[in-house]
Image (spheres, rainbow, N blue to C red):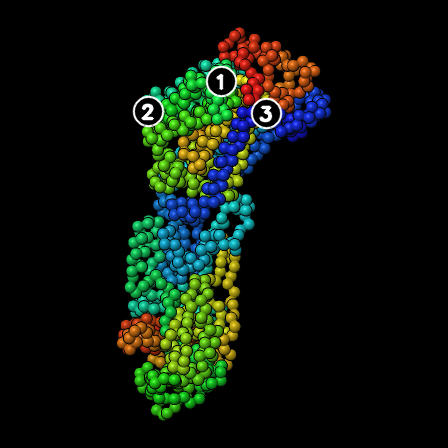
């Protein structure tokens, strides 16, 4: 009876092999599918069982995970946002159902502790393969500047965006998008609360979930004249004293289309005005001619070196690429030179242009993250200022600064800060299908104080704020920009 | 592991050449003759190894659960080791030549099970604390208690059964008691027997036992003794068909009876697992006894018929089968447990989440029937592969003892017990990893559950008893050993290639002492059974 005994032994081994085969099938072949199954609560519970790192700025905690107040809650930690709407464009949201947005998404590996930089060499972690605890993200946002910008916008009921950058470092100190939303309901552990909040927010008009600073592109209008002027100065095509046309309207090159000044008035009493005057008064004709004169290639090169046409930019949230459009002929180049036609940029891009002028022609990589910290608040990594290739010379930057001072001093001056010289450029951009009847977007690009710029800011107020068709960058957007600069300088930074 | 023998000679593997074997033996004879190692030292070292692995696993759980290493835990560990030491001493005293691998393997499985049960305790306690409920009783502490009781059974079995052949006398008694144990839950009122739809329990106050676990051993004993006596009946010539010899229809009675019992268990107790266990073991023992594959084919055929009938008429079976075919179809209902188990296994993946770092408690019955998904989640495929291999070695060690021991009853007993372990593992693990329909039985030594643990320690004691007989040098207690010259005189039986004992040998003195001990003319006595059938008879 030993033969059957051996056969039974063999059968036993076959049984065990079958089990091993099926275990391999489940744990290796089907593992990814089952692990990612939405009904498998393990991944989610795991994420919510570790304390997700906090997002802070200037000593204020903007987003943090606290023990869930409900003891029966299967998810141990509840995400909380302080001043949700104020910081929502930066922090984003963190939802079980709808995923994450903003910083919560961009810095997720750090916040949930899986980022390589957080690899803490604790023995138990190494031995057990347990995920390290979540790290913290410290933002470069200055709460005082952020609050000043947000309140300046919301107190007037404006819809738009403010971005403020420290010119020498590229640190973004304010990033506001209004109207905003509160990310707290989206982080609720109640599915119904999340769904209701999401459905409401998705239907908001004007939209609230979009971070206008990075995800919306607008025609820059006259603020783009900074780019055109920079390109022309670099090409040696213009100087502040050079006479330029003062005609109220010009005929575009290679076409019969005419282009008139904003108010349809001549730029000066004579046939020509100095270029500095045209810049200060933002007359369209001279810039259209200048753009056509230096050509699309030079314009494009300058815009690109300032950050246009870069679809890969992250701050670390992904930033919509700013575009120049085709500029196929002289007419379109001329129109593009005054920031119309197909030119579209993000408020962040516009702030970047301003900051580059303030920084003497050297653009810095913009970023909102100042530091990555371990769970114990020790610094793991600091963002170092990153110089990009020089966009234009120091002398061009100096000339632009003087031109922008002229523009600032020509304006209405509402909210001017005593003792602080600001250099600025306003813009009033026509948009949409009926550009003449739509209330225009109004812009204000500014930096200060000259000669030692601490802050560069770009403000856009969509649809002219409350001024309707009469809105201009000077009247609507500039008081907000000045308030932001005042807050930044008052903060002693 | 410096056994002085050639591996080929050990099992008398058919592949081993008959030419070199005698040469080997001659060469090794002096060493073997000098002293037969009891190999208790190996067992002790392996037990220490098992204890070390268990301790390491426990430390990992505590580290991952951020628990402080408490004195209570230390006592728990000390108790576990003391129990193992006791078992080891008992083996030294009562079965000194027993297989040195069997006890450490069981102890390691038991230890890993304890760690996992403790780990699930921690999760349950944390859950209760978060809900503000009272702290639940710790299953791990109870399981240590059950381990102690299991070892008492283990020692008692070794002590009270000095020779496994004595059990043959109690074959019918064992069968009768087994049948009663199996039937009892069905007869008892549901309040005393039904847990989660299966009537397989006997609840006595706070304790509840699953009699099926004990019935398993009793049936193996019964069938071993029954088959020894009635082998002629099963091997009497029937029709030749397809190259196989089929039994006469009238000889099918015992198999049909076993089938009937299995079906009754299924229908009246709703217990798929025990039913499957029972029938599988009977079939394999029948095959080993008769060497006829035709019995297996007949058995599988009527099993298929029974399974089809059960699937048609028993709703519980229909549910299990539909869950098996698609566990996610009724995710929130009947498929929940299996689905959760699969999620746990998949989340563990190849390497596991680490002991104490997963969420095995999400699976219902994570410490009993589904403990393998808990283990699969935390120690991964690598870990459960290791556990399955341990089971495989445990079962094949029993098989090896069956090969080595000379009496038919011992062979059938060890084979039945060894196969019972492997078959139970296949049925329960296959169920939870969805290889076969889930049946709801416990994983030997690993699952939480007193009956299972105690019964399996008793089972292991019997395996050790048989292996002791197989390895014991013939000079010590075997007056009937063949005279010198016939064969290497002092070669331990386990070293010898397994040989068929011919009828003649049985008639001449062989196990005279035992026979006297066994009393006269027991009808079920194995020695009277015809033995030594050769292949192809």
The chain containing the residue under callout 2 comes to B
In front: A446, or B92? B92
> What is the secondary structure assignment of the residue under circle 2?
helix
Residue B440 at x, y = what percent? 41, 31
Same chain assignment for discs 2 and 3: yes
Same chain assignment for discs 3 and 1: yes
Q: Is residue B87 above or below residue B370?
A: above
Badge 3 local density, few (<14 within 10 Å), some, or many (20+)? many
Q: Earlier in the sequence, mark 2 or mark 3?
A: 3
Q: Which residue is at a point 50% across and 63% down the rendered structure image?
A: A383
Q: Which residue is at a point 43% across and 34% down the rendered structure image?
A: B436
In front: A146, or A324? A324
Are the residues at dot 2 and dot 1 in contact (C-beta closer than 8 Å)? no
Q: Which residue is at a point 31% across and 69% down the rendered structure image?
A: A158
Residue position for label 3: B99
Residue A451 at x, y = what percent? 47, 78
Q: Is residue A3 above or below residue A120?
A: above
């Amino acid at each position: 009876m030993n033969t059957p005994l051996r056969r039974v032994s063999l059968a036993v081994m076959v049984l065990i092999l079958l089990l091993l085969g099926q275990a391999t099938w489940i744990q290796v072949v089907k593992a990814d599918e089952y692990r990612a199954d939405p009904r498998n609560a393990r991944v989610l519970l795991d994420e919510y069982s570790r304390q997700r790192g906090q997002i802070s700025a200037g000593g204020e905690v903007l987003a943090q995970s606290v023990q869930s107040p409900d003891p029966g809650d299967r998810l141990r930690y509840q995400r909380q946002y302080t001043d949700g709407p104020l910081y929502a464009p930066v922090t984003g949201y963190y939802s079980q159902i709808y995923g994450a947005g903003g910083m919560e998404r961009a810095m997720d590996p750090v916040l949930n502790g899986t980022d390589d930089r957080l690899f803490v060499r604790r023995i138990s972690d190494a031995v057990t393969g347990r995920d390290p605890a979540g790290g913290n993200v410290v933002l470069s946002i200055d709460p005082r500047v952020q609050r000043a910008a947000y309140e300046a916008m919301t107190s007037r009921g404006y819809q738009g965006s403010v971005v403020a950058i420290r010119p020498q470092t590229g640190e973004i100190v304010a990033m506001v998008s209004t109207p905003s939303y509160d990310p707290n309901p989206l982080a609720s552990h109640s599915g119904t609360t999340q769904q209701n909040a999401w459905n409401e927010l998705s239907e908001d008009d004007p939209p609230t979930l979009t971070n206008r600073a990075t995800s919306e592109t607008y025609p820059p209008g006259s603020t783009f004249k900074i780019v055109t002027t920079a390109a022309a100065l670099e090409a040696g095509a213009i100087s502040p004293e050079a006479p330029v046309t003062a005609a109220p309207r010009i005929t575009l090159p290679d076409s019969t289309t005419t282009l008139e000044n904003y108010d349809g008035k001549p730029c000066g009493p004579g046939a020509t005005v100095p270029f500095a005057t045209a810049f200060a008064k933002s007359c369209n004709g001279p810039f259209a001619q200048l753009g056509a004169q230096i050509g699309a290639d030079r314009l494009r090169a300058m815009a690109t070196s300032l950050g246009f046409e870069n679809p890969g930019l992250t701050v670390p949230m992904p930033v919509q690429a700013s575009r120049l459009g085709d500029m196929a002929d002289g007419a379109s180049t001329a129109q593009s030179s005054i920031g119309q036609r197909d030119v579209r940029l993000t408020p962040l891009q516009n702030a970047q242009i301003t900051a580059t002028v303030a920084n003497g022609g050297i653009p810095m990589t913009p970023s909102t993250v100042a530091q990555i910290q371990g769970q114990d608040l020790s610094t793991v990594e600091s963002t170092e200022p990153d110089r990009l290739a020089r966009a234009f010379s120091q002398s061009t930057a100096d000339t632009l600064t003087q031109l922008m001072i002229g523009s600032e001093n020509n304006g209405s001056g509402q909210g001017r800060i005593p003792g602080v010289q600001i250099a600025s450029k306003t813009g009033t951009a026509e948009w949409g299908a009926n550009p003449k009847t739509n209330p225009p977007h109004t812009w204000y690009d500014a930096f200060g104080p000259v000669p030692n710029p601490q802050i560069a800011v770009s403000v856009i107020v969509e649809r002219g704020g409350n001024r309707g068709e009469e809105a201009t960058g000077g009247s609507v957007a500039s008081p907000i920009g000045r308030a932001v600069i005042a807050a930044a300088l008052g903060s002693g930074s | 592991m410096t056994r002085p023998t050639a591996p080929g000679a050990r099992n008398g593997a058919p592949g081993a050449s008959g030419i070199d074997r005698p040469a080997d033996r001659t060469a090794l004879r002096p060493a073997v003759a000098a002293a037969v190692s009891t190999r208790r030292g190996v067992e002790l070292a392996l037990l220490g190894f098992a204890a070390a692995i268990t301790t390491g696993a426990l430390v990992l759980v505590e580290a991952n659960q951020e628990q402080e290493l408490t004195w209570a835990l230390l006592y728990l560990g000390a108790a576990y080791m003391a129990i193992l030491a006791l078992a080891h001493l008992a083996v030294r005293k009562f079965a000194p030549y027993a297989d040195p691998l069997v006890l450490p393997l069981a102890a390691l499985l038991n230890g890993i099970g304890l760690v996992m049960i403790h780990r699930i305790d921690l999760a349950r306690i944390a859950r209760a604390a978060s809900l503000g409920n009272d702290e639940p009783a710790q299953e791990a502490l109870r399981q240590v208690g059950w381990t102690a009781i299991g070892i008492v059974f283990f020692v008692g079995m070794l002590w009270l059964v000095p020779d496994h052949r004595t059990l043959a006398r109690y074959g019918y008694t064992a069968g009768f008691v087994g049948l009663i144990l199996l039937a009892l839950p069905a007869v008892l009122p549901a309040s005393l027997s039904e847990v989660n739809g299966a009537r397989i329990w006997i609840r006595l106050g706070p304790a509840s036992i699953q009699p099926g676990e004990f019935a398993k051993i009793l049936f193996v004993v019964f069938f071993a003794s029954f088959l020894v006596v009635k082998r002629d009946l099963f091997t009497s010539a029937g029709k030749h068909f397809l190259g196989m010899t089929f039994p006469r229809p009238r000889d099918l009675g015992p198999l049909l009876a076993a089938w009937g019992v299995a079906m009754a268990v299924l229908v009246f107790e709703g217990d798929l697992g025990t039913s499957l266990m029972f029938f599988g073991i009977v079939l394999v023992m029948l095959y080993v006894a008769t060497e006829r594959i035709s019995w297996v084919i007949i058995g599988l055929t009527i099993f298929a018929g029974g399974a089809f009938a059960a699937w048609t008429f028993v709703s519980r079976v229909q549910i299990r089968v539909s869950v098996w075919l698609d566990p996610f179809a009724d995710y929130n209902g009947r498929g929940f447990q299996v689905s959760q188990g699969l999620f746990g296994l998949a989340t563990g993946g190849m390497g596991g989440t680490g002991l104490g770092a997963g969420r095995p408690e999400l699976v219902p019955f994570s410490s009993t029937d589904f403990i393998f998904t808990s283990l699969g989640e935390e120690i991964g495929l690598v870990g459960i592969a290791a556990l399955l291999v341990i089971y495989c070695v445990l079962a094949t060690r029993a098989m090896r003892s069956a090969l080595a021991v000379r009496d038919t009853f011992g062979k059938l007993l060890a084979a039945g017990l060894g196969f019972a372990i492997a078959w139970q593992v296949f049925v329960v693990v296959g169920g939870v990893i969805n290889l076969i329909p889930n049946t709801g039985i416990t994983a030997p030594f690993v699952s939480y559950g007193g009956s299972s643990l105690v019964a399996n320690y008793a089972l292991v004691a019997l395996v050790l008893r048989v292996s002791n007989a197989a390895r014991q040098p013939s000079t010590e207690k075997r007056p009937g050993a063949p005279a010198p010259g016939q064969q290497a005189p002092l070669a331990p039986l386990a070293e010898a290639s397994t040989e068929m004992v011919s009828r003649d040998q049985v008639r001449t003195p062989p196990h005279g002492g035992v026979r006297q001990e066994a009393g006269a003319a027991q009808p079920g006595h194995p020695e009277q059974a015809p033995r030594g059938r050769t292949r192809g008879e």
